[in-house]
Image (spheres, rainbow, N blue to C red):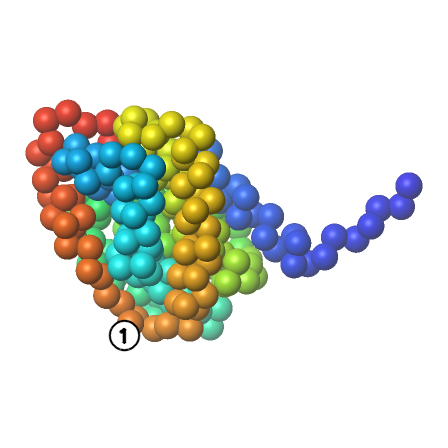
Amino acid sequence: MKREAVSPEAMAILPLFAWLSPSYPVGCYAYSHTLEWAVETGDVTNEETLVAWLTDQLLLGFGRNDAILLGEAYRAVRDRDASALEGVNDLALALSPSAELYLETSQQGRSFLDATIAAWPSSRLILIEGDVAYPVAVGMAAAAHDIPLSIVSSAYLFGFVQTFVSAAIRLAPIGQTAGIRVCSALSATVQMVAEKTLNLSLDHIGSAMFRADLGSFHHENQYTRLFRS
């Protein structure tokens, strides 16, 4: 039987299924991005409040910023601009409001980059020594392998939603079926953020998640913890 040719577009997005899978060795299961604190303090208690908390994170917090940083890293690698890439990464790391959130993005970013270089090497990838922020690492790899930015941005943000839903299930305010509904409910928001940030620059970086940022400090001293952030 004759095999039909697979389109380049279809082949281009296949790595994303591995890169953003919970099984990819970046340690995402160990972090909650202050969600554990939000559950402890009663900000997130059920499906409805989890959707509200994650919606704010996507629109007003890390989601929007990460999408912009990912896009800028993507363009820097695409244009072979090592200086611009270094500047994006430095800013991404500096934006971490606490030691725990710095560890979250830098540990996942370094782990992602090392694993991807080992399995998906590319001569177009500009290497970064030392700490690298997670959205920067994903943007770098996507550009080096010609994955369309619009697709990788949406996939990255939805991957984070799934990670937080998994954390919420382990923290017990929701069950698995509710978790699936939360993912479905947030899919349109994810797509909207990805589309609106597609052509934004570093000048558009900004966050208004003050309570969550302060929560990352309180989490460091929380009496019982399942997660590292």
The residue labelled by disc 1 is 203
**In the displayed structure, does residue 71 sit left or right of residue 14?**
left
Name the one closer to the observer, 35 or 175: 175
Q: Quadrant of the C terminus?
A: top left
Image quarter for residue 153? Answer: bottom left
**In the displayed structure, does residue 82 sit left or right of residue 40?**
right
> Residue drawn 60% across and 48% down?
14
Name the one closer to the observer, 181 or 161: 181
Image quarter for residue 69? Answer: bottom left
> Residue drawn 33% across and 45% down?
51
Q: Quadrant of the N terminus?
A: top right
**In the displayed structure, does residue 156 sit left or right of residue 220?**
right
Amino acid beneath label 1: Asp
207 up-or-down from 156: above or below: below
Name the one closer to the observer, 77 or 204: 204
Q: Position of residue 88 (x, y in %)?
A: 31, 65
Q: Position of residue 114 (x, y in %)?
A: 41, 44
> Residue drawn 89% across and 46% down?
2
Q: Position of residue 37 (x, y in %)?
A: 18, 37
